[in-house]
Image: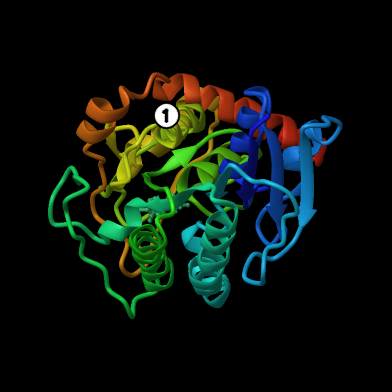
Amino acid sequence: MPRTVVTGGAGFIGSHLCEHFVAQGHEVICIDNLLTGSRDNVAHLEGDERFRFRLHDVTTYIDVPGPVDNVLHFASPASPADFERLPIQIMKVGAHGTHNALGLAKAKKARFLLASTSEVYGDPEVNPQPESYLGRVNCIGIRGVYDEAKRFAEALTMAYRRVHGVETRIVRIFNTYGPRMQLDDGRALPNFITQALTGEPLTVYGDGSQTRSFGFVSDLVDGIDRLLRSDVWEPVNIGNPEEITLLQAAREVLELTGSRSELVFRPLPPGDPKVRRPDITRARDLLGWTPTVARRVGYQRTIDDFRARLEAKGLLRS
Ligand code: UDP
């Protein structure tokens, strides 16, 4: 039975990875300090003997007794709301956390997979963004903490590959959504869905003409699984190339929830990228991966999950 460590395993994406690899027959060690993750996200796995939860902050030494085959490093706050709330924690987990996770992989001769991000491209001048694009990041901007932490993490991953021969993989994750995102996560889709279901106005930042490409979490997990099993060490974009404006995203959420909430316009946060869309040629050619979940289907599954959780908290507007 392969043993797989998932840092940030109680987070949104991490919990879906834990679930996936437990189902694949791995023993999964989920490490999380619950800063932005939640034990609720993995509660359904806790009875399984192949699953273990460890409350630990990966910015300090990671001690895992016994063999380890894979280290998936997914620990980090990742919502732009966190860039202002948790900037130092973001830089520490991207730097010290990545160093410790790489050290674990090196000591155990395990395969290492880094969760990187489309944010390494910053506010891009080219659209869509291929992996060869070197990016346009403002290191002193509000987003700089996350962008630079992930750029540093990619550089450190390559250094461990070159110096220590660690088998490394780097996934650049584009906007991803799905069940288990925090209700108050602060990102566009969780905000819109929570607002629509609770009868609050949907907060569109700027004039809503900025674009994003939203991918469903199960497609991302499939891409990560393929990347882990491949021999591709170069960074690979994983995301859905269907690009929409934020105004369109808000309208689609209103339609699918049947909500009568209004749209309100709020100031665009500084440094907010104007466009974002993955070039997925590399994922398609090297991993045979393409997204399969249509946006409406993904939205519906996410809305159902949000509705159930809001209802359980007594926050649903009937
Ligand atoms: N956004 C919005 N309303 C919200 C939250 C976000 O219009 O309530 C916008 C945000 O300004 C950005 C886009 O939606 O242009 C996506 O933001 P998100 O926080 O999801 O992540 P990002 O892609 O910016 O990292």
x and y percentages locating residue 135 in the rendered image: 21, 61
Residue that extends furthest to the right in the rendered view of this protein:
47
Quarter of the view holding residue 175: top left
Give the secondary structure at mark 1. Answer: helix
Name the residue tied to disc 1.
226
Measuring 33% from the left and 70% from the top, which residue is drawn there?
Answer: 270
77 vs 267, left or right, is right
Image height check: is 19 above or below 272?
A: above
Q: Quadrant of the C terminus?
A: top right
Q: Residue furthest left?
A: 126
Query: Which quadrant, please, contains the N terminus?
Result: top right
The answer as to whether callout 1 falls within 8 Å of ligand 1 is no
Q: Looking at the image, can residue 109 be seen?
A: yes
- In terms of image quadrants, where is residue 232? top left
Regarding residue 77, the answer to whether it shows in the image is no
Q: Nearer the viewer, residue 286 or 185?
A: 286
Q: Outermost residue, bottom direction?
A: 140
> Who's the residue at 33% across and 32% down the image?
240
Determine the residue positioned at 34% across, 43% down: 246
Using residue 211 as the reference point, say whether residue 184 is left or right of it. Answer: right
Colour option used: rainbow
Residue 195: image x %, image y %?
58, 43
- The mark total stands at 1
